[in-house]
Image (cartoon, helix red, strand yellow):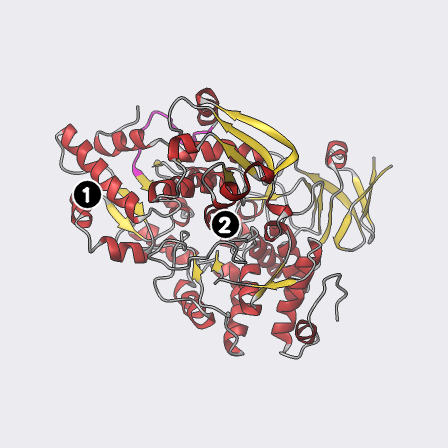
């Protein structure tokens, strides 16, 4: 058996000795050595389902798929049904040329087979593909204090910060191993000490900051550390209303992608900040002041990856992370109003909103769905990042209001007003 | 000769020349061509990393602050190890974060490919090493730099 500093139970030691076969032995060895690397004291049981970050059947990831196939062959499943990140393709709602389809079908050649394997290993259901697995409609909703092992960075920061659950920024594969064993190493955000703030962020803007830019500024400054954010409750309130949660979802995704933030506290708003206040701040915490000028500086620092910055955009994406039901309703009204004011009926470039399959199902039952479709917009369940992984697609001039999509692709960041202008009137300000 | 001491996450002994990046190593972006086209050896295609862009990563000793980017990084490192296009070693000035740790563990345990990994070498290590110097890594996490 491998040497470890962790305190293991007799059952865990038995698995390490091969009592449940070689696949489980290697799974346990990986988790234990992973925990040892972070001086974890033990493995702790998961309270909630995992969320798997790899949702795409890329043939070169076959070493990972092979592990999953071994689980299937041996009848091994996760302890609880799980959710996964969004699918990469939806030709019905996101147009693709024959050449683009050929490339997508090559990059994601194992997609169908991989989804089948996910189902056999414990995927919740055929719709369980969204980066925002915590939406009511999707149903992977942890409770405060729950121990989790999630890997999708935007979901991790939401679960830790807004819900008050406890998960590390687990790497892909490790979250699946934790789901299989039903346990995860105890370190980092799973401990009280690991959840303390290294930074005080003072929001001193004269107007409500854009969540995607505020999150970007915070992420770039604090990197992987924990910020305690003051002054934001002035703009989004002291209760976790749906508007506040949507703001925090988008802000958090930007902190996690522009930096590597896995947890933030918002004074007077998020659960731990409400209960423990300033006692969450480490004595030697640094301070970062954010005013309007600082946010303008951050936006001005974004590189524009287009060949000609003055060209007009060709496609717009909204929904990275996935839009909530309420956000879709709000965007429908905003688009309708902008089209009416411009004397137009439909958007002039493909305008693609992304959300979870379960949210689409609910949205289709509402009065807003036909209204959104009437604007000419598209609604899909894909991940825009995976769309941009196709070089034929990323060669187009894509705009987005998502700082995550901007960071990981050549898409250009625009604010909501600029995006509306571009899709209704054409061009950028 | 200058000597630095870190933690041997995947211990091993090795001599070779240093390839240095002072910015975070984005695994997914760097190995993209290996992943999508089976490129062997792997050439870094991360345009945001000016020091690594266009350079061979396979078989090299990477000296980096930390791994950044997508949380798929662990499985990417496992995949490039399975393809045989992995670096020989990764030397971190910071504590290696979970993306890197999981990747080198997956490569070791599931693919039987050791990527020697030493972390916590300190900021001075990356300030000192410029690239091209001869390095000697020992199993206790010591890194010697010969000019």
Q: Residue at x 47, y 42 (%)?
A: A270
Q: Nearer the viewer, residue A344 or A14?
A: A14
Location of the N terminus of chain A (image quadrant): bottom right
Asked if residue B27 lies in the magenta stretch, the reply is no
Q: Which residue is mark 2?
A: A164
Quadrant hosting residue A313: top left
Q: In the drawing, does residue B128 fall left or right of residue A26? A: right
Q: Which residue is mark 1?
A: A376
Q: Position of residue A281 (x, y in %)?
A: 60, 37
Residue A266 seen by the camera = yes
Crowdedness near tag 2: few (<14), some (14–19) or many (≥20) residues, C-alpha within 10 Å: many
| Residue mark closest to the camera, 1 vs 2 | 2
Q: In the drawing, does residue A58 fall left or right of residue A227? A: left
Give, as a single range, the part of the protein colored magenta: A302-315
Q: Residue at x 41, y 30 (%)?
A: A234
Q: Chain of mark 1?
A: A
Q: Position of residue A209 (x, y in %)?
A: 40, 29
Asked if residue A308 lies in the magenta stretch, the reply is yes
Q: Position of residue B137 (x, y in %)?
A: 81, 48
């Amino acid at each position: 058996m491998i040497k470890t500093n962790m305190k293991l139970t007799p059952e865990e030691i038995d698995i390490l000795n091969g009592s449940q076969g070689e696949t489980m032995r290697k799974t346990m060895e990986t988790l234990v050595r992973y925990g040892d690397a972070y001086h974890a004291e033990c493995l702790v049981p998961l309270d909630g389902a995992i969320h798997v970050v790899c949702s795409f059947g890329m043939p070169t990831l076959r070493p990972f798929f092979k592990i999953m196939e071994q689980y299937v062959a041996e009848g091994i499943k996760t302890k609880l049904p799980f959710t996964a990140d969004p699918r990469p393709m939806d030709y019905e709602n996101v147009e693709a040329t024959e050449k683009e389809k050929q490339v997508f079908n090559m990059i994601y050649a194992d997609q169908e087979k991989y989804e089948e394997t996910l189902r056999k290993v414990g995927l919740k259901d055929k719709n369980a593909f969204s980066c925002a697995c915590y939406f009511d409609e999707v149903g992977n909703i942890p409770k405060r204090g729950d121990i989790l092992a999630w890997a999708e960075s935007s979901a991790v920061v939401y679960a830790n910060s807004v819900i008050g659950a406890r998960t590390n920024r687990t790497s892909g594969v490790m979250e699946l191993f934790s789901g299989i064993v039903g346990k995860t190493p105890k370190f980092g955000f799973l401990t009280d000490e690991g959840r303390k703030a290294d930074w005080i962020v003072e929001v001193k803007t004269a107007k409500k900051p854009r969540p995607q830019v505020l999150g970007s500024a915070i992420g770039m400054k604090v990197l992987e550390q924990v910020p305690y954010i003051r002054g934001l409750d002035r703009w989004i309130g002291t209760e976790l209303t749906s508007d506040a949660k949507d703001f925090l979802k988008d802000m958090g995704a930007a902190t996690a992608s522009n930096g590597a933030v896995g947890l933030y506290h918002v004074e007077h708003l998020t659960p731990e900040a409400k209960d423990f206040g300033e006692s969450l701040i480490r004595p030697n915490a640094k301070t970062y002041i954010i005013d309007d000028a600082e946010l303008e500086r951050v936006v001005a620092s974004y590189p524009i990856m287009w060949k000609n910055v003055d060209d007009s955009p060709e496609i717009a994406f909204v929904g990275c992370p996935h839009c909530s039901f309420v956000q879709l309703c709000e965007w429908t009204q905003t688009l309708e109003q902008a089209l009416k004011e411009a004397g137009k009926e439909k958007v002039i470039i493909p305008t693609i909103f992304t959300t979870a399959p379960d949210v689409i199902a609910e949205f289709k039952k509402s009065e807003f769905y036909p209204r959104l479709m009437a604007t000419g917009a598209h609604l899909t369940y894909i991940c825009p990042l995976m769309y941009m992984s196709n070089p034929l697609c990323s060669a187009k001039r894509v705009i987005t209001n998502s700082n995550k999509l901007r960071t990981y692709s050549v898409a250009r960041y625009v604010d909501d007003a600029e995006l509306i202008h571009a899709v209704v009137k054409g061009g950028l300000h | 000769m200058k000597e630095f001491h870190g933690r041997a996450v995947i211990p091993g002994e090795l001599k070779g020349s240093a390839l240095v990046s002072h910015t975070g190593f984005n695994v997914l972006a760097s190995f993209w061509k290996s992943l999508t086209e089976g490129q062997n050896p792997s050439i870094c295609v991360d345009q945001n990393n000016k020091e690594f862009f266009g350079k061979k990563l396979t078989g090299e000793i990477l000296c980096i602050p930390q791994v950044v980017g997508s949380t798929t990084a662990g499985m990417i490192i496992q995949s490039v190890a399975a393809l045989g296009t992995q670096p020989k070693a990764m030397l971190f000035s910071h504590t290696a974060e979970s993306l890197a740790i999981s990747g080198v563990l997956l490569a070791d345990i599931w693919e039987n490919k050791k990527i020697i990994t030493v972390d916590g070498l300190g900021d001075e290590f990356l300030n000192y090493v410029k690239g091209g110097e001869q390095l000697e890594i020992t199993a206790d996490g010591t890194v010697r730099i010969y000019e």
